[in-house]
Amino acid sequence: MTDLAPHELRILLAVGRERGFSAAATALGMTQSAVSHSVRASERKLGAVLFDRGRKGAVPTAAGEVALGHARRVLRLLEVMGAEVRGAAAGGAVVGGTVAGPLRIAAFRSAALHLLPRALERLTARHPEVVPEVRIVREVGRGTAGEVLDGRADIGIATIGTTSPVPPELVGGVLVEEGYALVHPAGHPAPRSLPLVDWAENCTSYTREWWTAQEWLPAATVEAEDDGAVLSMVSSGFGMAVMPELSLIGAPASVEISDLGADRPTRSVGYVTTPELGRSRAVRALIRELREGAVSDSRKSE
C-alpha cells in the first residue's frame, strides 16, 4: 500500500467536515473533480470505501470514521513536530527547548470548572507561548477519551478506573480520587425523603452497584442537563442529589452537603492522551501542572 500524503489527509478531512465533495472543494480552493479524484485514490490505497455518496452528500462509512480519526492525529503530530523543532531551535542551550503552540484539551464540565483553570494559569505563566484550546464534552458514551481517539483533542480530562479503563490505544493516569456526597436543601428535617434529581453523566458504571444497593435512594424523578442544573434545583428546595466532590466546589449556602459514610462511592478523574502526544512537551507540561494541583489540593484537605 502506498502511504497517503498530508494533502490527501486534509482532503479527506474536508469532505468529512463539509459532508460533500463540492463544499469540500470550495473550502479547499480546489475543483470538485480534483477532490473526487483524490478521495478515490485514497480509497484505493487504503482498500476501503470511506464515504457513502448519495442524496445526503458524502457520509463517512465506519471505515471512513476510522480513517478520519487517524488523519486528524497524523496531521496533528506533524504540527507538533514543527512546533517542537522550532522550539528546540529557539531554546538554544535550554534543555528540551521552549514549549509553544496550541494545546487542545477536552474536559467534562466539572473538571473544566474546577480542575483545569489553576493548572492552565500555572502552565501559561511558565510557558506563555502555549495556547490552550478547551472544549467541554459530556462524559457519556465515548466522552473525552473519544475526542482524543478521534484526533480532536491532544489530551482529555476523563473519568477512569477499573470499570471505565483507559482505552487500549491511549495512555493515562489518575489525578484525583473524589468521593460522592448527599446534597440537599440546608436545614431540611428529612432530606432523604425528597425527590431525587440526577443527570446523565452522574451514575456511571463505578457508582451503579452502590446506587442499586441503597434502599432509601429512589429512582430519579428529574433528569437535568448537567450538574450545575442539579445543584440549582437542589438549592431551590426542589429535591436532593448524590454528587461528586468536584461538582460541589463553590456550592451555595442554601444547600447542605452530608457525608455518605465509609462505603460512599468514588470516582477517579484523570487524563488520557495518545502515546505519541503523551511525549510532546506541551502535553507533558500540562500533566505536570495537573498533578501538582492535585497534590496541593490533597495537602490542603488533610
Image: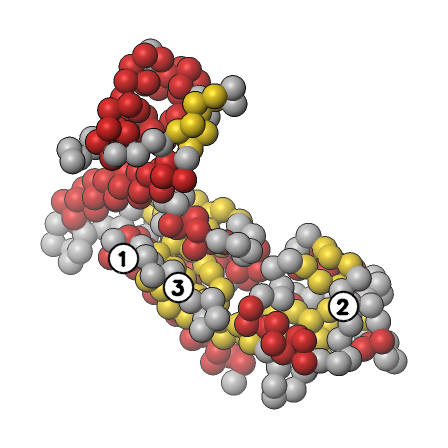
Please tell me whether residue 68 is drawn above or below residue 147 in the rendered image. above
**Render colour scheme:** secondary structure
Q: CA distance from mark 2 to mark 3?
A: 30 Å
> Tag 3's secondary structure?
loop
Please tell me whether mark 1 sits on a helix, a strand or a loop.
loop
Read off the residue under disc 1: 275
Which residue is tagged 2?
219
Q: Residue at x 36, y 42 (%)?
A: 66
Q: Nearer the viewer, mark 3 or mark 1?
A: 3
Residue 231 position, x and y percent, is: 72, 62
How crowded is the residue under tag 3: few (<14 C-alpha within 10 Å), some, or many (20+)? many
Q: What amino acid type is highlighted by mark number 3? A: Val
Distance between the Cα atoms at labels 3 and 1? 12 Å
Residue designated by label 3 = 166
Instruction: Relative to 226, say whether 58 is above or below.
Output: above
**Helix, strand or loop under label 2:** loop
Q: Residue furthest right?
A: 189
Number of other residues with Cα within 10 Å of mark 2, as a class: few under 14, some 14 to 19, many 20 or more: few
